[in-house]
Each structure stands twice: as C-alpha cells, then as structure tokens.
Image: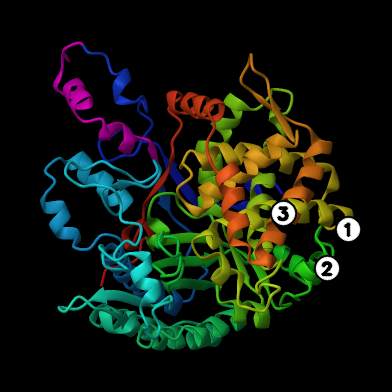
Amino acid sequence: MKSDRLSIALAVALSVALYGCGTESEQPASNVPATTPSTEQEQSAVVNPIADKVAAYAEVSLQADLSHLSDGDREAIGYLIDAAKIMDALFWKQVWGDRQALMAKIEDPVTRRFVEINYGPWDRLDNDQSFVEGIGERPPGAQFYPADMSKAEFDAADLADKDSLYTLVKRDEAGELYVVPYHQAYETELAEAAALLRKAAAVVSDPGFAGYLGLRADALMSSDYQPSDMAWMDMKNSPIDVVIGPIESYQDALYGTKAAFEAFVLVKDIAWSERLARFAQHLPALQRDLPVADPYKAETPGTDADLNAYFAIYYAGDANSGAKTIAINLPNDEEVQLAKGSRRLQLENTMQAKFDTIVVPIADLLIDPEQRSHVQFDAFFENVMFHEVAHGLGIKNTLDGKGTVRQALTDLASSYEEGKADILGLYMIGKLGEMGELDAAKLHDNYVTFLAGIFRSVRFGASSAHGQANMVAFNYLQSQGAFNRDPESGRYRVDFDKMAAAVDGLSAKILTLQGDGDYAGALAFRDELGTVGDTLQSDLDRIQAQNIPVDIVFKQGRAVLGLSQH
C-alpha cells in the first residue's frame, strides 16, 4: 500500500503563530540565553517557556470529502459534532472540574492555550507535570473519587457499583462515601446529547446506524452501554459513524476503572475498508498459533470482527486530550468481544499526519541510514492496524476462574493490554506473511518502522498506559538484542532474526502474566522495564532539539467541513 493510494483529504499546516502549534524551538528554558531580550517577542519567549510547548504541536485540519453522502448523512454529521462537544465539556468535569474557573485564573493567553490542549494544568506529554503556578500534582483519581480518599477506605467501603465504569464516588456531609451513576451526575448534559443522537438517527441513510444511535442515546440516560455496543458491532454499512460516551479508563490512575467521556465523528473510506475486511476471518487461526502455552489461548475470539478505514472529522474529550488517537479498537466490554469480536477503525488522515510530521524526521535522526528506507507509511499503517486487531486475541479471563484480566491487574491492566496489542501486532504481521495474506518480504519494514514509532510514543513519558507499554517493549527488545545502538552515531539498527525471536518471547511473557492474573509479577516486570534510561533520554533530547513536533492538534468543526451552522 502506498500513501497516495489512501486519497487522504488532509490539510497539514505547520504554523509559528502564537496559537498555531508550529515548530519553533523546543529547547528547555535552561538553554535560553541569559542576555536581555532586544524585542518584545524575544522577551515573551524568555519569560514564558510555555510558548515553546504550544509551538511543538503541529496543527492539522480535519477534512474529508462529504460530496458522496446523502443530505441526511451530512445533516446528521452536524448533530453528531454538537453531541461530541457535550462529551468535551463532560470530560473537563471528570479530569479537572470547573473549566471556566480555571481559565479565569490564567491571564497569559499562551498558558490558556496550553491548558486547552491538555484539558487542564498538567502537561500530558511530560509525565503530567504541572505548568500553572499554584497547582500541584495531578490527583491520580482525577474527579472520579474524593481527593482525600485512600485506597484502603475505598476497598473497605461496602458500596454497590463502586467498581462500575460508569459511577462517581463522592463523600457526603457526614464524611461517608457514596456512589452516583454518571446518568444522574451528568443528567442535564447527557439528556441534551441523547436528543442530538436521536435527531441524527431520524435522518441518516443506514437503518443499522439509526438503530445504534437510538440505543446509544438510551445508554447515555441509563449507563447501560452493552445493548448499544452489540448494535454497533452489527452495524456494517453506514458511510458515517460516531464513537461517543464514557469509554476508556486511562484517566483513572487510581484503579484504572472509571471511564472518561469522548467522541469521534467519522466518515468511512469504503474502498480501503473493503481491502481490510478479509483479515478478520483469520483471527481464530491466529489465536491458535499464538506463541504461548495452550491454556493461555483457549478462548475463541469472535469471528464477526471487522476492520475499516475512516477519515476522522471531529475529536472530543478524552480522544482529544494530549496525544491524539490514530486507531480505535472497541468495544472494551469483554462479553461483547467474546460474543461479537471487535471493530478496528483506522483513522488514516490522522495517521498520515503523524507519520509525515513526526515519524519521518525522527527516523532521519535516529535510524541507521542503511535501514532508513525500511521506514514506510505502509508499514506504519499495518503496525497500527494489527495493534488494534491484536486486542481481540489472547485471553480475557484469568485461568483461575476468578474474573477478567482487567479485574485482576486493576491499574496495570491498560498498560499490559496496550503492550500485548503492540507486540502481537508484529507477530501477526509475520504470520500473515507466512500465510500469503501480506507481503512477507516487507516484514523488515514493519520491524524498523515499529522501532521508529516507539521513539515517537515514548516522548510522552511513561505515565500513560501507552507510554509504559512502549518502554517495556523497548527495553525488553533491546535486552534480547533485537536492535542495537551505535554509540558513535547514536543511531539504531534492527537485528531482524533476533527481533523475530524477541517478539515471540515478549508475546508469551505478557500473555502469561495476563492469564495468570499475576499482579505482583506484572508490577515487577513493569517496574524493571517500564522506565526511560539515560541513553534513551539523551536521544529523546536530541529529538527535542530538532524542533520535531511532539504531536498534533486539530482545526475542526462545521466550518472546516463546509457544513452550515445550526
């Protein structure tokens, strides 16, 4: 696959304007000369180092060709964007609280812009460091739990639904903990969002999508999301789509349980989706061939899973905070996965933007020139795609019969699930090459591009689930000789034979920890390998010095798409 075959309707613009998220210097404040600035602009740069952080984001216009859509589908997109904006406001409440009160305390427009990017005063790509004076560390429980609640108090509390993905834990006037479902805590906002989904359902062209929208509206008002997840899995033919509601639990660093609100509004690339469809049929065979003992692959993945490519036209809430998602694997509900499988949505315009603006210049800097030609968008696309496919493989329930892997690994579950998907994605690409479904000769492209992609991802630090997963993979693969670093040039070179063996080894390690529900073992493995070493940090500093964007931000909405305002 060539990048120009994606027909991506994307406008990528790097700007050096104050809000433009361009590529000005990323040098730390300590490197700024101590001389007196000669201009007002230079003085601003010295006094406010946040300007460099804002400028380190490349701005991308989220566009897509809507001309082939029916009038009803175009109208529905407007309603879906409006509903997504409500998810955005709810996400602010979950991770910070009163957005307007925070903004009112900040006079500097650059800092205000950085708060908007991060949905709060903590830098999501710098280990959640606070950048607003007077605000301390990010609370691990965000606003899902009382700030003064200890784990011991929570564990001892006999409260129905306290572990639910869709409840808040609060403290009453007497100091006792109690539980409030999302649909009660955010009733006004969710009712408005549900009404917008029903308006969209009334005008869309595909009956299956209309049915999903109606069930999703019901779910917002009841916190029962499984029926709508099932309907979403059955919905195959709509040219537009929306992912909306409380979905991922990364924001809950205390227990990894509470789901955060987000939304993606999407337009399907029908031609490319048809090419991807054939891979889903191989999931059972790939599961049987996993490089781990039979008990850890005894579950049978759903065969109704599908792969599709989309143009993302709106991000909101959790999806829009910090590093931007380039692919989606849902639903997270293990029962739905076992019954229906999963849907994997490749966000090709966002993916292309990140590859062009971030991965390519990183590879130019850190990959051995003899292997630089292996860094290809085709491989990047496949690595991301099969990462999402790999979420559906492995094991969902622990072998001791005491519950799911998520329940057993609690706060470590997300990082291990991401790590599993990363490494099994590479494993699957190799297997599909052996089966003749992919070009086996290009596996080396996948390996080298995977390494370049790790450098991109670990710039976010190791505080997120993805960051921890990438660091474990990097350090494990390096320990097995899968790649080496030339100390003179500071460039990396993959050993292809050792990489294949290391991929098998790490796959087996993660799948075993998950199947055993071995929290202590998982914690020890994460603590051993989940940190950024001094040498790698020096290389990340080199990336920073080259003014390579840390991520992207979006110019998006009705006006960007040429849709009328309501």
Q: Is residue 440 left or right of residue 533?
A: right
Residue designated by label 2: 294
* Above/below status of 458 relative to 188: above
Q: Nearer the viewer, mark 2 or mark 1?
A: 2
Is residue 387 in view from this perspective?
yes
Q: Is residue 512 left or right of residue 51?
A: right
Q: Earlier in the sequence, mark 3 or mark 2?
A: 2
x, y percent for residue 410: 51, 66
Residues 452 and 422: in front is 422
Residue 417: name its quadrant.
bottom right
Tell me where the magenta segment starts and ends, as one range.
Answer: 35-58
Q: Earlier in the sequence, mark 2 or mark 1?
A: 2
Q: Residues within 10 Å of mark 1 (few under 14, many from 20)?
A: few
Residues 55 and 204: in front is 55
What is the three-letter code of the residue carrying label 2? Asp
x, y percent for residue 6: 62, 52
Q: CA distance from mark 3 to mark 2?
A: 14 Å
Q: Does 259 lie within the magenta span?
A: no
Total labels: the figure holds: 3
Q: Does 46 lie within the magenta span?
A: yes
What is the three-letter code of the residue carrying label 1? Met
Residue designated by label 3: 509
Residue 21: name its quadrant.
top left
Q: Residues within 10 Å of mark 2 (few under 14, many from 20)?
A: few
Marks 3/2 in contact by CB < 8 Å: the verdict is: no
